[in-house]
Amino acid sequence: MSFRRIEYFLSVAKHLNFTKAARECYVAQAAISQQIKQFEEELGFKLFDRGGAAVSLTPAGEYLAQQCRVVLSQYNGAVKQARAIADGAKRELRLGINGPFAQDSIPGYLRRFRQLHPEAAIALREGGRDEMLDALLKEELDVIIIPDYGLDLDERFETLELSSERAKFMTGPHTPLAGRRFVSPAELAGQTIFRVEGLSEEAQDQPLPGYFVRLGLGENPIQRVKTYLEATILVQAGLGIAAIPGGMEGKVTRDVSVFSIEGDSFRLRTIALRLLPSVSAAADYFFQVIRQELARAKRME
């Protein structure tokens, strides 16, 4: 079986028309019909039902077409990466980050990545979560590290969970909440909540505000900011509060006080995300590093 034959098969599957498929593949209709016939003989089952001018995929043909699209995409991506390596192009990991987990753990992953692949360049890009997702889909980034709340991910993506932590809040050093370990939701009524999320309009529809509603804070003013640095500065000034992962508590500046919400069990989850099928050797290598480090951490628990 050749990749050319797979291309012919997928073209007929797309158009359900041998003439259009032959035109798309720049071959004679007789040639593409012969290739499909030989393919079916090789497989031992029919790919298409042919009824006069009408052509339809058999159930087996429909399943095979789905799988072949993945195989062909992986093959084309591998050829693209191999050609870049053969041409002497420098391998580069383009990593997008959003959220506090990046500052905590990404340096360790990058250090291990550099040890294993010293020839690879590393480019970091920080921004809002929607901005990172858009850049990943446009193949401007190879891997992104983002919070996952509200994401509706499909088979185009591979994910690795990096952390899952209870949510806490930070407040300024000169507020009535400073120094408290636990605060009731009622005491937060009216407080401005700085929500760390990109500035795209899509972010308004994501469900973190639903968390605030469950706490009874649905009427609180919410100001969206792009990074945790912005949120921290505003919180330090005593202008409001911001939700953070519990693991970040020991890493915030000393001028910020962190507290938990009484009875709250909401968790902030952070994931590494890449596109499938992979078109980036650097993404493959970086995901291997993350898997190894996560497995090592689990063994040490």
Image (cartoon, helix red, strand yellow):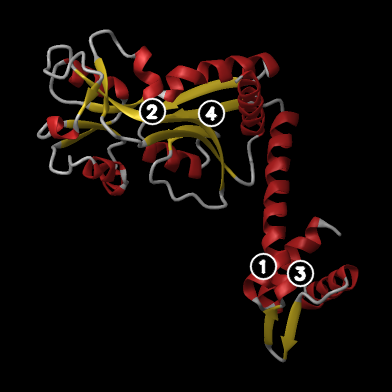
Residue carrying label 4: 94
Indicate whether 262 appears above or below 152.
Answer: above
Q: Which amino acid does the dot numbered 3 rest on?
A: Val
Q: Is residue 190 left or right of residue 29?
A: left
Q: Are marks 1 and 4 in contact (CB under 8 Å)?
A: no
Residue carrying label 3: 27
Q: Is residue 192 among what the camera can see?
A: yes
Q: Which amino acid does the dot numbered 2 rest on?
A: Gly
Q: Which amino acid does the dot numbered 4 rest on?
A: Arg
Residue at point 63% right, 36% down? 280
Q: Are marks 4 and 2 in contact (CB under 8 Å)?
A: no
Indicate whether 218 appears above or below 167.
Answer: below
Residue carrying label 2: 99
What's the distance in space between the residues labelled 4 and 2, CA to CA? 17 Å
- Image quarter of the C terminus: top right
Residue at point 51% right, 23% down? 123
Q: Which callout, 2 or 3, points at the residue further toward the start of the chain?
A: 3
From the viewer's perspective, is the residue at label 4 or at label 2 nearer?
2
- Image quarter of the N terminus: bottom right
Report helix, strand or loop for mark 4: strand
Q: Which mark, by number, is residue 24?
A: 1
Seen from the viewer's position, the closer of residues 53 and 196 is: 196
Q: Residues within 10 Å of mark 1 (few under 14, many from 20)?
A: few
Seen from the viewer's position, the closer of residues 30 and 258 is: 258
Q: Which callout, 1 or 4, points at the residue further toward the start of the chain?
A: 1
Among all residues in the image, which is located at the extreme front? 263
What's the distance in space between the residues labelled 2 and 1, CA to CA? 45 Å
Residue at point 90% right, 68% down? 42
Q: Which callout, 3 or 4, points at the residue further toward the start of the chain?
A: 3
Seen from the viewer's position, the closer of residues 109 and 265 is: 265
Residue 236's quadrant in the figure?
top left
Q: Which mark, by number, is residue 123?
A: none
